[in-house]
């Protein structure tokens, strides 16, 4: 299994692996009879990566034991029918609900029948049986599928459909089972976690879900990603402060600070909302870690609009920040907008934001030096234990490098005093 893209796509891959547990799953593609490529189709670079992975895996039909190559996920869903014509090397295509049909599709392919199948998005699945592909102490929990936001630059609603929330009791059951299997950290993901439950219960229910997860799951850490700014309410912050096992970390993609650009993006929040939300969080506690994501070079982004973007980044001082140069995605409204910015300018502006953020991130990290944190140890390399505190989300943030004469157990928590900071990583020493 080769799974590309986001953590939500990873959960889909894990559901597929759960259906295939009776097979002999191998990590070396040269030894595989069947290879599944679970693709990403979000932006142009992700599409290219997915195509390259498919072609690379197809080579094992000549160089390895490969008999059957199956392509699943967002790219397959987005270009249903087209990929089958362009990629004769592939023996079967499934969309975003591939876990429901993966066994049947493989069996048909091994018997020489090439199939394509694309079902509407859904949230039902054997979550209890999924195979966790992360480290044993970490698991992503997908609380909803699809998205009701209609941001003009984003293809996700066209690929994954409207918001479909999982039943709260199903999520609570899965979380408890994961904790019983030894998972220490649960990371809640969706396209927009703050709208969880709207479709099922008539109003957002993220706060209630978090409250119950904190009380019943048994997980040491519960982390929330993909919170939209207008959904970060006082009630959400109250719940986060109420429970010690909900980490004080908020991932809030804001995309821009210029109101004209935000309107063109069809975002539901304006710059005042963004400033107010970040101010509200910081007034609660400076211990909150805030991550955001931005787009530079959106169509019509004037010099003044870009200056507003820079000003917002500088004024609010995010702990973590990622920025994408705008990618015109076919089928999205923004791809047809006037005022398209040159690729070189988009890349330059994105680089300028990251250069600005580099200094901000370093200053924010320095505030943690001298303080003691719980650190979850994840690996050991070259005589150094490597882990994360609550301030580092898995896979997207930096790490904490821990020096210790003691042997530390992978997947366990230790008290660590921070001794040094750079813009991404921290260094610390074990507190005895």
Image: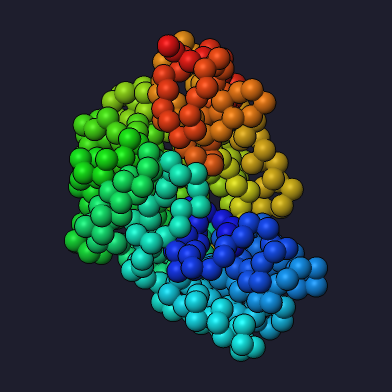
Residue 237, horizontal then vertical, whole percent: 26, 35
* Residue nearest the viewer, comparing 388 with 307: 388
Residue 128, horizontal then vertical, whole percent: 34, 59
* Residue nearest the viewer, comparing 30 with 375: 30
Residue 87 versus residue 330 in the image, above or below = below
Residue 379 versus residue 114 in the image, above or below = above
Q: Residue at x 58, y 59 (%)?
A: 3
Q: Residue at x 32, y 23 (%)?
A: 285
Q: Residue at x 50, y 81 (%)?
A: 104
* Residue nearest the viewer, comparing 255 with 232: 232
Name the image quarter holding the C terminus.
Answer: top left
Residue 29 versus residue 257 in the image, above or below = below
Q: Quadrant of residue 174?
A: bottom left
Total numbered badges shown on the rendered structure? 0
Residue 61, horizontal then vertical, whole percent: 75, 73
Name the image quarter holding the N terminus.
Answer: bottom right
Which colour style is shown?
rainbow
Residue 50, horizontal then vertical, whole percent: 65, 63
Q: Residue furthest right?
A: 63
Residue 185 versus residue 356 in the image, above or below = below
Q: Residue at x 61, y 52 (%)?
A: 326
Q: Quadrant of residue 43?
A: bottom right
Residue 82 in sight in this render: no
* Residue nearest the viewer, comparing 350 with 340: 350
Residue 64 in sight in this render: yes
């Amino acid at each position: 299994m080769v799974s590309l893209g986001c953590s939500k796509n990873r959960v889909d891959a894990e559901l597929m692996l759960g259906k295939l547990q009776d097979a002999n799953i191998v990590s070396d593609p040269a030894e595989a009879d069947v290879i599944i490529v679970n693709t990403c189709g979000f932006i142009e670079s992700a599409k290219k990566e997915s195509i390259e992975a498919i072609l690379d895996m197809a080579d094992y039909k000549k160089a390895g034991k490969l008999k059957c190559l199956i392509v699943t996920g967002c790219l397959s869903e987005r270009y249903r029918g087209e990929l089958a014509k362009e990629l004769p090397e592939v023996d079967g295509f499934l969309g975003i609900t591939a876990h429901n049909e993966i066994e049947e599709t493989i069996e048909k392919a091994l018997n020489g029948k090439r199939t394509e199948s694309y079902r509407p998005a859904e949230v039902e699945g054997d979550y209890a049986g999924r195979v966790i592909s992360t480290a044993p102490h970490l698991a992503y929990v997908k609380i909803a599928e699809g998205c009701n936001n209609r941001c003009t630059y984003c293809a996700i609603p066209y690929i994954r459909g409207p918001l479909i929330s999982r039943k709260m009791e199903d999520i609570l059951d899965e979380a408890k089972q994961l904790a019983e299997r030894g998972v220490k950290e649960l990371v809640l993901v969706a396209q927009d976690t703050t709208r969880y439950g709207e479709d099922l219960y008539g109003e957002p229910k993220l706060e209630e879900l978090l409250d119950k997860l904190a009380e019943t799951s048994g997980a040491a850490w519960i982390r929330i990603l993909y919170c939209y700014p207008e959904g970060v309410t006082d009630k959400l912050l109250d719940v986060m402060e109420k429970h010690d096992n909900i980490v004080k970390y908020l991932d809030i993609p804001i995309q821009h600070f210029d109101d004209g650009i935000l309107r063109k993006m069809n975002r539901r929040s304006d710059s005042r909302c963004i400033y107010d939300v970040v101010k509200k969080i910081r007034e609660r506690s400076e211990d909150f870690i805030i991550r955001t994501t931005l787009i530079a070079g959106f169509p019509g982004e004037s010099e003044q609009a870009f200056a507003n973007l820079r000003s917002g980044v500088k004024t609010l001082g995010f702990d973590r920040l990622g920025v994408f140069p705008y990618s015109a995605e076919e089928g999205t409204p923004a791809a047809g907008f006037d005022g398209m910015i040159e690729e070189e300018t988009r890349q330059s502006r994105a680089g300028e934001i990251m250069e600005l953020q580099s200094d901000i991130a370093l200053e924010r990290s320095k505030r943690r030096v001298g303080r003691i944190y719980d650190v979850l140890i994840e690996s050991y390399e070259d005589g150094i234990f490597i882990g994360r505190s609550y301030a580092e989300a898995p896979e997207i943030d930096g790490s904490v490098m821990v020096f210790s004469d003691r042997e530390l157990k992978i997947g366990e928590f230790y008290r660590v005093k921070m001794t040094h900071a750079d813009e991404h990583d921290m260094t610390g020493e074990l507190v005895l």
